[in-house]
Amino acid sequence: MSVVALMITGWDAGPWERRLQSIDSGLDIRTWPDIGNAADIDYALVWKPDGKALASLANLKVIFSLGAGVDHILGADNIPDIPIVRIVDPNLTARMSEYVVLHCLARLRRYAVYREQQARKEWIEQPDPCAAEVRVGVMGYGVLGQDAARKLAVMGFDVAAWNRSEKNDGDIPVFSGEAGKAEFLARTDILVSLLPLTPDTHGVLNTALFEGLARDGVLGPPSLINAGRGKLQNEPDILDALDRGVLSEAVLDVFVEEPLPAESPFWTHPKVVLTPHNAAISDPRALVEYVYRQIARYETGEPLENVVDRTRGY
């Protein structure tokens, strides 16, 4: 019988345990810190785990991240040198694309402007470009970025992507590396960040990047959507860019410190739309099935899917 440990910080572990039990009532599921003999644990399902706690599991075989990112694991100390598997699931992917499309359409159709006009009881028709006139740039072209880009293209947006390494994707142009970044930014009116957090991407959403964005867009100054990781963004630079008009709007789902402190200026900034890190929530109903399939593969000697490359950070 496989023994699974749930090591979850900040979420209720109950739904994860119940979903696992419904799939396989024979699993021995233990919730940290009440895991009994640490040497019994075969698999750990984690969110923001304590590295020392993971290291104490002497016979641990695989670590499963319960979110799309893995920086919450790689940033901990004493992580055992065993496979780390990241979540790649259609449910999570679809949720992220919904979020990105929603906010691109809101920017296109000037939702914030009309809400402000409604509050002032103003009946003013704004200029109304079509989606094909608006250039969206998706930074980070993994599973999430590819799906979001394709759905934005279906809506009619002029979509391009940037990725650290070269990728070809049919009708969507993909710029790559530092050599392609300037050209990518210069043709971007709405920047969508879905990058993983690595040493190379830490703080990448900064003044220099914002000033490289397009200045000739039909919607005015460019805007930012960050649904990737909080530490991608230099938060003082975002506020400065908004105040100087370098950015017209920032839609932020993630922050350096979460929950966002009450004193943060993002709460009340008129050009900021913020959400509580829920762009693509980890739904136990869908994601546990993915983890269970991976455990079954491992138990039968098949290779695990979506194993993290620690040298790349994702």
Image (cartoon, helix red, strand yellow):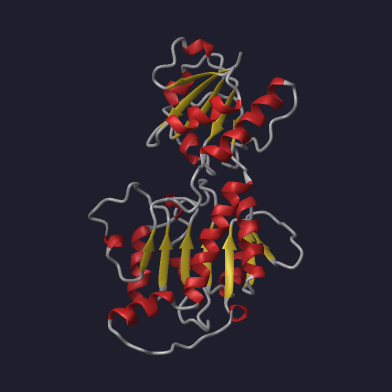
**Quadrant of the rendering where the C terminus is positioned:** top right
Residue shown at the point (38%, 90%) measured from the top left: 124
Residue at (44% x, 11% y) in the render: 36
The answer to whether residue 212 is seen in the rendering is no
Q: Position of residue 254 (x, y in %)?
A: 42, 53
Residue 156 seen in the figure: yes
Q: Nearer the viewer, residue 281 or 217?
A: 281
Q: Is residue 135 above or below residue 145?
A: below
Where is residue 106 shown, x and y percent of the image? 47, 72
Residue 179, position as x, y percentages in the image: 64, 64
Q: Nearer the viewer, residue 257 or 12?
A: 12
Residue that appears at 49% across and 34% down: 73
Marks counted in the figure total: 0
9 up-or-down from 241: above or below: above
Left of 311 or right of it: where is 277?
A: left
Residue 215 image offset from top left, x and y in percent: 50, 80
In this rendering, would 180 be left or right of 99? Answer: right
Quarter the N terminus occupies: top right
- Choose top left, top right, bottom left or bottom right for residue 298: top right
Residue at image location 33% in from the left, 47% down from the top: 259
Does residue 243 appear to the left or right of 86 in the view shown?
left
